[in-house]
Image: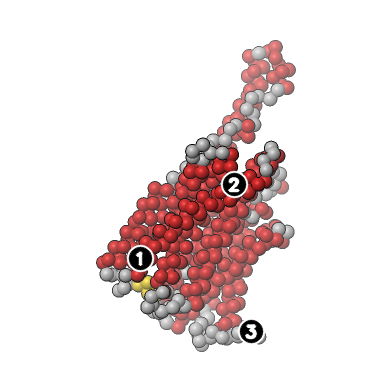
Amino acid sequence: MLAFRLARGAHPVVQLRRLLVAAASAGTGFLLLCTLAYAMERPGAGAGLRLAWCVAPIAATVYFAVAVARTDPGTRPRSGLSAVGLGPGRLMMLAAVSTAVACTLGSMLALLFFLHLRGDVSGLPFDGSAADLLAADQPLPVAAALTLLALVPIAASAASAFVLRPRATKTTARAGGITRGAKAGPATATASRPGTEAETESEPPARAEPGTEPAAPTPPPSGLPWGVALLAAGLAVETYTSRSGTAPNTGFPLPGSADGSPAGVLAGWALTALGLVLAGPGLTYLCGRLLQAVRPGALRLLAGRVLQEEARRIGRPLGVLCAVASGAYASIVLYAGPRPEAGPLTTLGALLVAGCAVLTLATASVEARQARSDTTSALLRLGAPATMLRGSAALRAGALFAVFGPLTWVVAQLAALPLTR
């Protein structure tokens, strides 16, 4: 009930993000139900492979739902909430419940739309318009449909709970040691210097607050070498598959299309996409280092430091977006040839993956802006002009585009090269 109250009293922008999660869940649920209808009409005719094609929309939807859960202000730890029983563990459960509610709403909408197109629900426009494609002549297995629709809510809520779980950090341990030292400090000082008892009791010990310690520099992400290795391995697998001549013989049928895609090319592209995701934080950190190179001014120094701090937060969504863009280019090259056009379900799946990638990056940017809100307020109080902050944001965006744009184009060209032979 508390999760429903927090959802009802949230900001309209937060409600919009939750509705977008519900829309993504609805699209993914509709794809799963269409796969079930295909299996009902043609049992054993590649229904399992079509279900495997739904893994990409499911993963994109879950990733977007987790990003929205991280930026939800209703589940953010604040001072005083632990006194009323809302500690980190309880807030984690609230985030998981809110994510499950949004995804379940989308799954129910998908089921309603699916039944409407089958003709099982009448009285609405387009009633039964896709009855021939959705196996309307056969009864719908309720258990199988509900199991498929429960995949996205369960996966999204579990992933949100795992990401937002309470973790003991080194800062907490260091603060606990300092607190114990602060408690023992006055007694030790009193025993060694009895003449300064009043002075020792009135003055707090030095470095009693952990916030006064200088912050350690952000270490660089460690996934860049692995990302480059996987990227090279994926391109090598695609090239080897195209030269060996085995690509046209084995394929996976696309949903809504009668043709197949080469298995080796798909495996190579999967490795390439994983490499881009792993290399994203490292490349973002390098962008920050390059901005601070060669006698930087205040603008470049601020932009570079912010990129270094946000490397892990926005690097992976950037890598995912680059992988989706390169895959979209390869798909355009694939269907520009003599192959048949993509079906409606293939188009829906591609739009879901691309839309979730873009929305996840935008949500991660919002989370990064919320994380540095205290720093921005401090700079404004110190007299920094607002134009400098806007210039720093534009400089960061330009640096990221200058690095990730050409990289995406090169990977897309190399990934599409085996498909044109």
- Residue 401's place in the image compared with 61, above or below, is above
Secondary structure beneath disc 3? loop
Q: For the residue marked with disc 2, what is the amino acid?
A: Ser
Q: Residue drawn 51% across and 65% down? A: 354
Find numbered disc 2 in the image and state the secondary structure of the residue it sits on.
helix
Q: Which residue is mark 2?
A: 392
Earlier sequence position, callout 2 versus callout 3: 3
Residue 125, given in percent of the width and then of the height, sits at 63, 84
Instruction: Say whether disc 3 or disc 1 marks the residue closer to the N-terminus.
Output: 3
The residue that appears at 28% across and 70% down in the rendered structure is 246
Q: Quadrant of residue 384?
A: top right
Q: Nearer the viewer, residue 172 or 390?
A: 390
Label 3: how many residues lie within 10 Å, few (<14), some (14-19) or many (20+)? few
Q: Nearer the viewer, residue 397 or 147?
A: 397
Kind of residue sitting beneath label 1: Leu
Q: Residue at x 51, y 52 (%)?
A: 400
Name the amino acid, label 3: Pro
Between 408 and 62, the one lying in front of the other is: 408
